[in-house]
Image: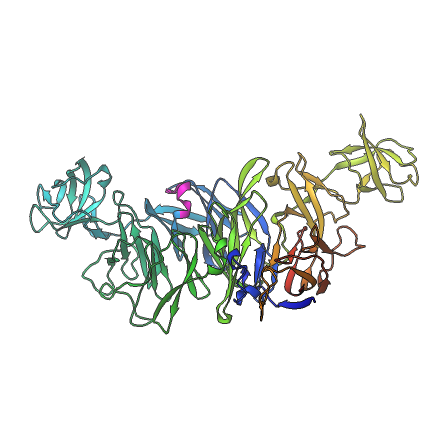
C-alpha cells in the first residue's frame, strides 16, 4: 500500500549544499538547503530572489582590478588598476581621471597580490616586490600617485643626505663586520664588508652603524660601497659588528601587508623578513624611528614561532589581527581602549590554518579570510568566554563552491536590500570567474551559500563594494574579442539583465511621399537614411488613418511600401511621413555585431535579438519608443535536496518515490518554471499571463501555486528556473511524496 510523506520547506537559508551531504538527512541543514542555488540571492526571510543584474558603466583599457575609494558619502571613486596604469571612475562609471602612469609600478601579474588600506584622502598600496605606493586625492577630480618615503630629519643633514626615520634590521650574520675609511661625518666615505652582500641596488639606501646613519651613494663591489656618514660613528672605524640596514629597500624587498590601527600605520611581511611587523609612531605615519621605546615610539618586531610565519595580512578590528601562511594571531591589550606600545606588544596565536594572499574582509562581526589552500572560508571571530578568537570554517557545508578565491567584497545591508552577504571571487580551474555568495544572520544562527555566474563564456574578474554599491569587472567575449567592462549590480529586483544598457530609437531621416496621386495599398517614399522596416507604423500628412508596413521593396528613388490597407486618399508629393512606433533601436557598441542580447521593457520580456552591423536591433513587438533595456540574460536554478526522511524502519534513501503534489509560495513571479521527474522526460510548467499587449507591463504573481507531477525516482527533486529576465521570488514550498 502506498504511503504519502509531506515535506515543508519553509525557507532555503542553508543555500546550496555540498553533494556529499545528499544522504545526511540527520542534519538540520538538509531540510533548509538545496542541491543547486545558482544566481539567487538568499533573503533574510529565508526565501530566495533572482539575483540582481548589472548595469554597464565603462570599458576598461585592459585586464583590471578595482578597489574602492570612499572619501565621504557624497564622494565615491573606483580605482581601476591595470598594467602600470590607473584609471579613476565615479560611482556612475563616469571617467574622473584616466591613464595615470606615473609611479604605477604594478604589473598585470601582481594585480591581485596587491594589498591596500585607506586613511582619509590617501590609499596605500603594498606588494612585496614593489615600493609602497600612495594614491592621494588632491581634489574631487584629481588624484596623484607617488612613492611612499619615510620621514627625514631636516635638522640632521650632511652633504645633502638627511637622517631618515626608516626602520632598520640586521639581515646579515652577526660575524659580518663593516670597516670604515673614517668615522667622521662627510661624503665619499668607504665602507668595506667582511663578506660580500652589497649590490648596485643598495645605492640611496641607509645603514645604521653603531647607532649612526650612513647613506650609500656608490657601489664598487659586493664588499665595497661608498657613502655619506651623517652622524659620527662613536666606536671608530672598526671592524664593527653593531650595524643594521634598512628593513624596507630595493635589495631586501617591501611589505605586503598594510593597515591603520590605534592611530599608527602598520606594515608587515617584508619580502626578506616575512615575519616582520612594523608600525609608525603614534600620529606620525611616516616616522618609523624606534627611538627610546617610549609608548608613542615606532614598533619593530617579528613574530616568533616554530617556523618563519610569513605575514600576509594585518587587519584592524576589535584587536589588531595578523594573518600569516602558518597561523592566525592577534595582539591583546589590557582593555579595549588601551594602546599597543613597543613594550607591551605580544602575539597570541589562535589557530594554525594559514591564510592565502586574498585580502580579508570584516563581515557580520567577524573577519573572513581564505584558508591557505584556497578551499575554505573561515571567520576569525572573538569569543568573550574564551577571551580569544575562533577560526570557524564557514564553507564546510558548501565547500564545493569555494575554488581558490582571489578577492572578497562585503555588503552590510543597504536601504534597498537588508541582507548581509559576502562575495568571494573564485579563481580556480573549475569555478573560476564565478562568485561564491555567503549569507549570514549571526543572531539567528543562519548562514548559507549561493553561486553567481554570468553569461556562458563570460566571467567575473574583479569585485568591490563602494558606499554600499557592488561593482564588478567582467571579462566578456564579444564578437571574438575580449573586453573588460566595469559593471554595477542593481539595487533591487527591477534589474534582471547583465551588462544592461538603454537603447535609443533610431532616427530615419526625413521620410516623404515620393510622387502625388498615389492610391491603393502601395506607397512610394524617399528621404529615409535607413530602410523602413516591416511592421513599422506611420501616418501621412493630409491623410487620415495609420498604416502598417507589410513589405518593403528598394527602388532607385527610394522604397515602395506595401501597406496593410488602402490609402484613405491620394497624398500630395513630399507629404511628410511620421513613424509612429520605434521598432529600430540603436544599442551600445560594446555588444559588437551579431551578438545576441535580450530586450526588456518594464516587466515585459521582448525576447532575444541579433545586433546588425550598424549596432541596431529591430523589435518585433509594439514597445514604447523609449526605455527599452538590452543586455545578457542569465539563468537562475534552484533545485531541492532529494525528498527524504528518517522513518522508524530507516531512511527512504534509494527507494523509489513519486512527487505527487508541490505547492510553491511565489512572490513577484514572472516566467516561473518548475520541473520534476516524470516518465521519459521532464515535465515543465510555465506561469504566464495571456492576452496582454507586447511591451505592456505584466502583473507579477504573488500567490501559492499548486502543481502535480507523475513518475518515480530514487532521488526526487524539484527544480525552479526561468527562461526570461524577469522578477522572481520563491518564499518556500510544500512537497508530498508517495512511496511504498
Give the magenta part as a residue range: 103-112
| Of 433 and 544, the residue lying toward us | 433
Q: Position of residue 45 (x, y in %)?
A: 59, 67
| Residue 692 visible within the image | yes
Say left or right for 523 vs 153: right
Q: How many marks?
A: 0
Q: Residue furthest top?
A: 556
| Residue 123 visible within the image | no
Q: Residue furthest bottom?
A: 385
Q: Position of residue 352 (x, y in %)?
A: 33, 59
Q: Quadrant of the C terminus?
A: bottom right
Q: How is the image coloured?
A: rainbow
Say left or right for 105 vs 485: left
Residue drawn at 88 percent across, 34 percent down: 522
Q: Is residue 187 positioned above or below 69 on the image?
A: above
Q: Is residue 50 positioned above or below 340 on the image?
A: above
Residue drawn at 24 percent across, 39 percent down: 201
Say left or right for 627 vs 556: left
| Of 658 and 241, the residue lying toward us | 658
Q: Is residue 339 magenta?
A: no
| Of 495 and 234, the residue lying toward us | 495
Residue drawn at 74 percent across, 37 percent down: 508
Q: Position of residue 144 (x, y in %)?
A: 40, 47
| Of 736 and 233, the residue lying toward us | 736
Q: Position of residue 1 (x, y in %)?
A: 70, 67
Amino acid at each position: 500500500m502506498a504511503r504519502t510523506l509531506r515535506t515543508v520547506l519553509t525557507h532555503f537559508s542553508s543555500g546550496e549544499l555540498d553533494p556529499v551531504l545528499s544522504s545526511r538527512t540527520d542534519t538540520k541543514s538538509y531540510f533548509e538547503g538545496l542541491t543547486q542555488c545558482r544566481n539567487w540571492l538568499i533573503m533574510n526571510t529565508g526565501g530566495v530572489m533572482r539575483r540582481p543584474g548589472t548595469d554597464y558603466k565603462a570599458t576598461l583599457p585592459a585586464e583590471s582590478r578595482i578597489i574602492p575609494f570612499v572619501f565621504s558619502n557624497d564622494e565615491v571613486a573606483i580605482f581601476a588598476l591595470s598594467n602600470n596604469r590607473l584609471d579613476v571612475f565615479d560611482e556612475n562609471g563616469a571617467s574622473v581621471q584616466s591613464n595615470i602612469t606615473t609611479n604605477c609600478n604594478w604589473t598585470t601579474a601582481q594585480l591581485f597580490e596587491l594589498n591596500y588600506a585607506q586613511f582619509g584622502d590617501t590609499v596605500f598600496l603594498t606588494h612585496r616586490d614593489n615600493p609602497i605606493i600612495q594614491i592621494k586625492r588632491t581634489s574631487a577630480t584629481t588624484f596623484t600617485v607617488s612613492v611612499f618615503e619615510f620621514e627625514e630629519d631636516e635638522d640632521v643633514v650632511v652633504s645633502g643626505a638627511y637622517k631618515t626615520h626608516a626602520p632598520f634590521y640586521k639581515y646579515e650574520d652577526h660575524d659580518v663586520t663593516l670597516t670604515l675609511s673614517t668615522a667622521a661625518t662627510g661624503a665619499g666615505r668607504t665602507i668595506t664588508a667582511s663578506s660580500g652582500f652589497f649590490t648596485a641596488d643598495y645605492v640611496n639606501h641607509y645603514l645604521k652603524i653603531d647607532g649612526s646613519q650612513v647613506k650609500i651613494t656608490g657601489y664598487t663591489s659586493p664588499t665595497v660601497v661608498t657613502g655619506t656618514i651623517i652622524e659620527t660613528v662613536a666606536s671608530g672605524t672598526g671592524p664593527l659588528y653593531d650595524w643594521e640596514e634598512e628593513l624596507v629597500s630595493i635589495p631586501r624587498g617591501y611589505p605586503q601587508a598594510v593597515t591603520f590601527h590605534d592611530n599608527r600605520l602598520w606594515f608587515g611581511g617584508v619580502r626578506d623578513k616575512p615575519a616582520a611587523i612594523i608600525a609608525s609612531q603614534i600620529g606620525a605615519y611616516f616616522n618609523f624611528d624606534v627611538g627610546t621605546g617610549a609608548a608613542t615610539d615606532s614598533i619593530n618586531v617579528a613574530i616568533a614561532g616554530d617556523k618563519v610565519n610569513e605575514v600576509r595580512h594585518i587587519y584592524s578590528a576589535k584587536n589588531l589581527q595578523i594573518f600569516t601562511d602558518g597561523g592566525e594571531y592577534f595582539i591583546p591589550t589590557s582593555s579595549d581602549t588601551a594602546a599597543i606600545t613597543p613594550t607591551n606588544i605580544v602575539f597570541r596565536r589562535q589557530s594554525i590554518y594559514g591564510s592565502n594572499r586574498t585580502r580579508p574582509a570584516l563581515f557580520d562581526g567577524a573577519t573572513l579570510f581564505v584558508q591557505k589552500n584556497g578551499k575554505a572560508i573561515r571567520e576569525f571571530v572573538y569569543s568573550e568566554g574564551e577571551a580569544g578568537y575562533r577560526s570557524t570554517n564557514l564553507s564546510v557545508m558548501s565547500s564545493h563552491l569555494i575554488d581558490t578565491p582571489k578577492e572578497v567584497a562585503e555588503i552590510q545591508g543597504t536601504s534597498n536590500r537588508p541582507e548581509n552577504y559576502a562575495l568571494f571571487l573564485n579563481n580556480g580551474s573549475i569555478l573560476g570567474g564565478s562568485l561564491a555568495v555567503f549569507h549570514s544572520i549571526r543572531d539567528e544562527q543562519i548562514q548559507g551559500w549561493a553561486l553567481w555566474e554570468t553569461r556562458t563564456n563570460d566571467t567575473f574578474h574583479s569585485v568591490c563594494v563602494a558606499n554600499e554599491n557592488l561593482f564588478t569587472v567582467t571579462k566578456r567575449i564579444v564578437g571574438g574579442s575580449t573586453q573588460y567592462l566595469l559593471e554595477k549590480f542593481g539595487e533591487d529586483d527591477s534589474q534582471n539583465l547583465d551588462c544592461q544598457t538603454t537603447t535609443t530609437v533610431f532616427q530615419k531621416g526625413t521620410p516623404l511621399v515620393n510622387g502625388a496621386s498615389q492610391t491603393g495599398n502601395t506607397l512610394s517614399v524617399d528621404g529615409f537614411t535607413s530602410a523602413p522596416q516591416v511592421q513599422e507604423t506611420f501616418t501621412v500628412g493630409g491623410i487620415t488613418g495609420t498604416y502598417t508596413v507589410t513589405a518593403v521593396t528598394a527602388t532607385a528613388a527610394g522604397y515602395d511600401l506595401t501597406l496593410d490597407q488602402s490609402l484613405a486618399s491620394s497624398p500630395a508629393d513630399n507629404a511628410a511621413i511620421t513613424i509612429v512606433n520605434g521598432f529600430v533601436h540603436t544599442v551600445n557598441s560594446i555588444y559588437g555585431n551579431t551578438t545576441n542580447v535580450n530586450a526588456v521593457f518594464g516587466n515585459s520580456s521582448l525576447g532575444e535579438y541579433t545586433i546588425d552591423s550598424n549596432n541596431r536591433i529591430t523589435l518585433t513587438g509594439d514597445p514604447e519608443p523609449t526605455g527599452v533595456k538590452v543586455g545578457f540574460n542569465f539563468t537562475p536554478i534552484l533545485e531541492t535536496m532529494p525528498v527524504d526522511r528518517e522513518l522508524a524502519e530507516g531512511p527512504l534513501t534509494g527507494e523509489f518515490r513519486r512527487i505527487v503534489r508541490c505547492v510553491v509560495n511565489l512572490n513577484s513571479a514572472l516566467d516561473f518554471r518548475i520541473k520534476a521527474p516524470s516518465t521519459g522526460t521532464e515535465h515543465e510548467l510555465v506561469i504566464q499571463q495571456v492576452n496582454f499587449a507586447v511591451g505592456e507591463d505584466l502583473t507579477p504573481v504573488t500567490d501559492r501555486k499548486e502543481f502535480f507531477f507523475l513518475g518515480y525516482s530514487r532521488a526526487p527533486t524539484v527544480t525552479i528556473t526561468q527562461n526570461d529576465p524577469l522578477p522572481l521570488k520563491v518564499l518556500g514550498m510544500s512537497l508530498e511524496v508517495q512511496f511504498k
